[in-house]
Amino acid sequence: MQVSSAYAVEYAQPIAEIADHGENDDITAISIPPNTQIILPDNGILAADGIITNGRHIRIVTNATMATYYSGDGLGSTNLTVPASFTQIVIPWNCTGYITPSTATGIAVGSAGIWYNMTGDWTQVTPGQIYRPKPRRGPLIKKSVKSSIKRALKLISNFGMEEDVRIFLGGETIEVSHPDSLFKFVMTKSYNSLLHRTEFAAYSTPYKLELYTKTDVHIANLCVVMKETPILDQVLALAMFVKTGCEVDILHKANYSSLNNDKELRNLLAGDDSIMRQKLRVDDVEINGQFNYDIGSINAAQIVQGALPIEMR
Amino acid sequence: MTAYTGDSGSYLGSCTFLNMTGDLTVVWDEQNREKMLALIKKKMDEGYSFFTTKKFAFKRLSRKVKVTPKNVDQIEEIIVTDEQFEKMCADMNDKDIATLVRGNDAGLAKRTGKKQLDAMVRARKPEDVIGRDSLAVRPVVGG
């Protein structure tokens, strides 16, 4: 029998009483079946059939007949027969009522704690034996996310990349390059990114993307995104750009970071491509050994005033 | 609703669009050529990239075909319910394409064939897409 305040209606006074603790000793024993869960509400809420507490009494109602079994003033005599097998009684965490049972078997909730008696001796329930029901948890992975991943894997398989994606999903790096290119693109899945970057579009690359020469010299980290496209589809799309000889579209659109310090190398790789020269900062000057500025953006007045001491390289 | 009748050889072209819920393939026939050209041009102007190839094998998706004991062996289409169809249109997250599909100017399809990436070619103008099978990638931007 379970009572929850979500399903109960508050009454102003009890429906009926079989016994009054001060006048009538006619107390009925109730046997609670094994694994019965009794949740005691903390605010005196009455249920049609169930258990009521109102700070002074606990009343059990069956078939609209109410019986008082406990009295807050200790005058009541009650018998709750607890079977030998474990019975759960869930007490709200802020319950302030207390019950004084008789010497018969039962459960007592006192200000000092909770006690049970199955053998004639009262034993205090240790904190570990009292617990609240765990909330139900939803599915760990949304159905739509699962479906999107499955579709992406199938699409990738259609293009013969299933082995690459398997390695990618395992956390290892995969490389994509075109035979006629100086570059190769190295992709590494970020930890714990598959589900999130399938469900949500973002403004950064959903995995780690690095640009290398084919001689394994790191050039830069790249950040490039296909709008509103899940992570695996982006892997396929990037591979498609590279394999079809269109990697320059990626290189021109990407943002660069962690540039290789070798300016001569960057100059060589950029060639005459003005956008690549800008991306690789080939024509930038170093100021104070730390910053790279486009020479055109330096404020002449700042230089004259000495605000920007320059160490030109 | 079926985009066209006849065997799969009567279609003009197809395109697989990548979106947040997975890929979706639309097909069209000769009578819808101009409308599809306009759509492809609009998408290219928006920054979409189209990669084309020789024809894939695929199955058409039909919204409504009454299956009877007589015709059950002859149906070569994959039948989807109206609810599934509407969900697929919604999943596209693209009003232009959804409008064409709902208006029967393009149909839905499910790709069944395989292609190598090396076989794909980047299309630079709508005319390169209209008569071929293709894959459309949403605009590429720096992150």
Image (cartoon, coloured by chain):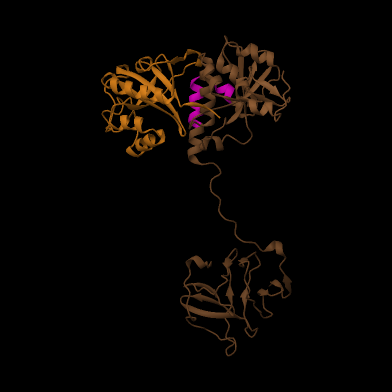
In which quadrant of the rendered view does residue B39 lie?
top left
Residue A195 visible within the image = no
Identify the hue of chain B: orange
Q: Is residue A229 above or below residue A55?
A: above
Colour of the chain lettered A: brown
- Answer with left or right where residue A259 lies relative to residue A37: right
Give above or below for A9 relative to B52.
below
Relative horizontal placement of residue B25, taking residue A215 as reference (left or right): left
Q: Position of residue A99 (x, y in %)?
A: 64, 77
Residue in the picture at 49% in, 65% down: A6
| A179 in magenta | no
- Residue A246 pos. (x, y %): 51, 16
Membership of A156 in magenta stretch: yes
Q: Is residue A249 above or below residue A107?
A: above
Closer to the camera in the image, A288 or A270? A288
In this rendering, position of residue B9 left or right of residue A5? left
Q: Position of residue A5 (x, y in %)?
A: 51, 68
Residue name at image x 70 percent, y 17 percent: A262
Q: Residue furthest bottom?
A: A23
The quarter of the image holding the C terminus of chain A is top right
Region of the chain picked out in magenta, as a range: A150-165
User: Dividing the picture into quarters, in which one does residue B3 lie?
Assistant: top left
Numbered marks: total? 0
Across and down, in percent, residue A27 comes to 58, 83
